[in-house]
Each structure stands twice: as structure tokens, then as C-alpha cells.
Image (cartoon, rainbow, N blue to C red):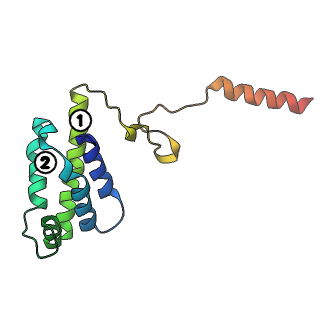
Amino acid sequence: MNTTWEQLESAAVSLARSGAIKDRLAEAYRNHLALVNVEELPAALREEFRACHDTLTREHPLRGEDAVRATVRKMSNQQADQLAERVVRLFAALVREAVREDEPVEHAALATPAVNGAALGAPRKRKSVPQVISLYSSEAQVSRA
């Protein structure tokens, strides 16, 4: 079973993918946000989560669709963008709450390689100066012989 943290993270990742914003928003809700138990969220974030949920399910569906599909169908792209931004900000607020409460922030995403293969949150490995100097020194000695 996925945790609230994982569901919000997955929703944010769904929103970051390519495709139409309305489709990404509906997918993020159906596959992730709908599975979040609001009582597992910190009290400070529950109202914002409920507001996002209500915004995504406010329209009455037509035959063959659900409330989410009906809602995003009636939204403008700008409204969908703004709601997607609220969801991403909600995930960021959850991360800040976890850090504020001094909870260990151990998650697979923090160990996932980022740009250029550097892990998020991991210290970069750097060559020390002596290694660079010794490399050039040994090359210089080899070329003289």
C-alpha cells in the first residue's frame, strides 16, 4: 500500500509528464489523489487537499464519464494549470512539514539519479587536488623516460 507521501509524489510526477494538462490532471487524480486518506495529512494541509479534491469533482458527469472527467472537460487550460500547480505545491508543503517535524526524509526519489547521474540530496564526489596533481606528475615522469 502506498503512503500519502508516495501518492502525492506520484501525482506531482504525473503532472510533470508530457501530454495535455487536462489528461494529466485527470490521471493524477484517478491514480493517486483519489487514494489519499486526508486524515493522514498534517492538519495544516487537509483543507488545501480537500479544496483540490472538491475542485476536481464538482461537475456532474454525463453518461459514460465520471465527475473528474466532467470537471476537467469544463475547465479552461489555465484553470487546469492552476490546479496542477496547487497539487505540486501541496506535495512540496508535505515535504516541508516532514522536514519541520524532523522526520527522516527517506524515499526512493531522493536516491533516484537526477540530471547527469547525480543523486538528489547526495553529496557530489569530487576529485581531490592531490589526485589531479599525482596524475599529471606520473604522466610527466612517464614521458621523460
Q: Out of 40 and 55, give the one closest to the viewer.
A: 40
Say whether residue 68 is left or right of residue 130: left
Q: Where residue 140 is drawn, which disc sits there?
A: none
Q: Out of 69 and 113, give the one closest to the viewer.
A: 69
Determine whether the residue tagged by mark 2 lies in a helix, strand or loop.
helix
Kind of residue sitting beneath label 2: Phe
User: Tag 1: Cα neighbours inside 10 Å, few (<14), some, or many (≥20)?
Assistant: few
Residue that carries the numbered disc 1 in the rendered image: 96
Kind of residue sitting beneath label 1: Arg
Disc with the residue nearer the chain's start (1 vs 2): 2
Q: Position of residue 89 (x, y in %)?
A: 22, 47
Quarter that holds the C terminus: top right
User: Tag 2: Cα neighbours inside 10 Å, few (<14), some, or many (≥20)?
Assistant: some
Q: Is residue 69 above or below residue 121?
A: below
For the question of whether residue 41 can be seen, the reply is no
Q: Out of 3 and 45, give the one closest to the viewer.
A: 3
Residue 91 sits in quarter: top left
For the question of whether residue 9 can be seen, the reply is yes
Q: Where residue 49 is drawn, which disc sits there?
A: 2
Q: Residue at x 13, y 48 (%)?
A: 49
Say whether residue 120 is left or right of residue 99: right
